[in-house]
Amino acid sequence: MAGRETLEELVRLQGERVRGLKQQKASTEQIEEEVAKLLKLKAQLGPDEGKHKFVLKTPKGTRDYSPRQMAVREKVFDVIIGCFKRHGAEVIDTPVFELKDFDIAGQFDPMIPDAECLKIMCEILSSLQIGDFLVKVNDRRILDGLFAICGVPDTKFRTICSSVDKLDKMSWEEVKNEMVGEKGLAPEVADRIGDYVQQHGGVSLVEQLLQDPKLSQNKQALEGLGDLKLLFEYLTLFGVADKISFDLSLARGLDYYTGVIYEAVLLQPPAQAGEEPLGVGSVAAGGRYDGLVGMFDPKGRKVPCVGLSIGVERIFSIVEQRLEALEEKVRTTETQVLVASAQKKLLEERLKLVSELWDAGIKAELLYKKNPKLLNQLQYCEEAGIPLVAIIGEQELKDGVVKLRSVTSREEVDVRREDLVEEIKRRTSQPSCTC
């Protein structure tokens, strides 16, 4: 029988395997098989009442991230944060972003912030390269006006709104049945709603509805349509109008939205030629909520606000799946150079050199073994994606140089020690993609 320490290590490794399979959402049969192996190993350990056991578990609703996953996650956040900062965003410690240019002291065009939010959304999704996407826009005032002219009772506005919002997942017949069968809406009223909410398009649809004999007579709807027409003008100037669709079925369930609402979805290619691409899930959303901040103001002042949220966890999962499918290598460190030695008994010299590089702001590493083989050091660089190796040997120390090796090309050049920092900076000045 294996020793107790060996068995405990086997239990630990098997436990990690089971957790890994659960995170990967493996088949139930596979998980149960590995759990049975784990229980068998635990049984071999036997009772151990005299030993206190501390079980470390990931809290519910959270997950652990491996170095590879964290590298991908940081890349996603870098893209998002960089995009916000290009638009003048400031970070506050919640953390949340706010656009400092949106000064409400004086007159301003409320559609410009909405247009910029949509521009930011498009920039982020394009930069992440997670696939084709479409941003749907609508206006809560148009929806409320639409419901009013169709004959929806005021008390049913919000519940009918929630039904309409399901049109991206359900057919119109299913939504209509819910409205009529579950929520008591008259069938003819539901039919009138259906004539509108199944429409989507660009600014031409906005202009068409502005001429609609019924909708154009509703003050709320008219205001919303007017603002959407102006919004499309700004989106054209920002160069993203082709990514935006006016979709009358977009409702966004939250009551605090007061104007324009938007939601970005990823698209998958159509199953057959001629069909429209299908949405495969929301990855960002937002809108205008002018009344929300005033709820917390003692004086009840109206504060114009727009906001957007990015579905970071969903995007992270998509990026991770794409990398796994392509079998792309992901760097988990930002090390620029490994300090290596060509002979034995040069640990002190390696420590001196790596310290010099650290002090100069260079991201450097060394292997902790006293006398590592040069081949092992070079292999480590290839596995970790480190681009450069600074090699020192007895001859290099005598000559006052360091042999700088490119890991990819395997080209080596002697660089004077006092010039090493600048040479490393020059060679690593072009950042490489880590994702």
Image (tube, rainbow, N blue to C red):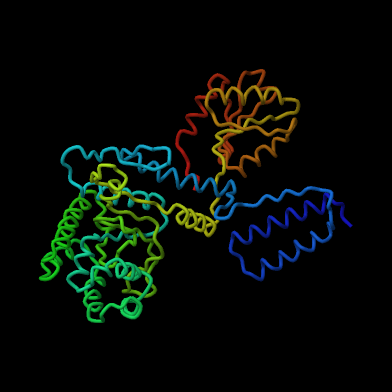
Return the x and y of residue 329 as percentages of the image width and height: 55, 50
Return the x and y of residue 377 as percentages of the image width and height: 67, 37
Residue positioned 24% across, 79% down in the render:
191
Query: Nearest the camera: 378 or 91?
Result: 91
Residue positioned 70% across, 39% down in the render:
376
The residue furthest right is 1
Horizontal side of 85 relative to 375 (left or right) equals left
Residue positioned 23% across, 38% down in the render:
103
Quarter of the view holding residue 369 = top right
Return the x and y of residue 351 as percentages of the image width and height: 66, 25
Horizontal side of 87 relative to 55 (left or right) equals left
Quarter of the view holding residue 181 = bottom left
Confirm whether residue 174 shows in the render.
no
Return the x and y of residue 101 as percentages of the image width and height: 26, 38
Query: Nearest the camera: 308 or 265?
Result: 308
Answer above or below: position of 232 versus 345.
below
- Quarter of the picture containing the N terminus is bottom right
Residue positioned 37% across, 51% down in the render:
309
Horizontal side of 31 relative to 275 (left or right) equals right
Quarter of the view holding residue 336 = top right
Horizontal side of 163 relative to 206 (left or right) equals right
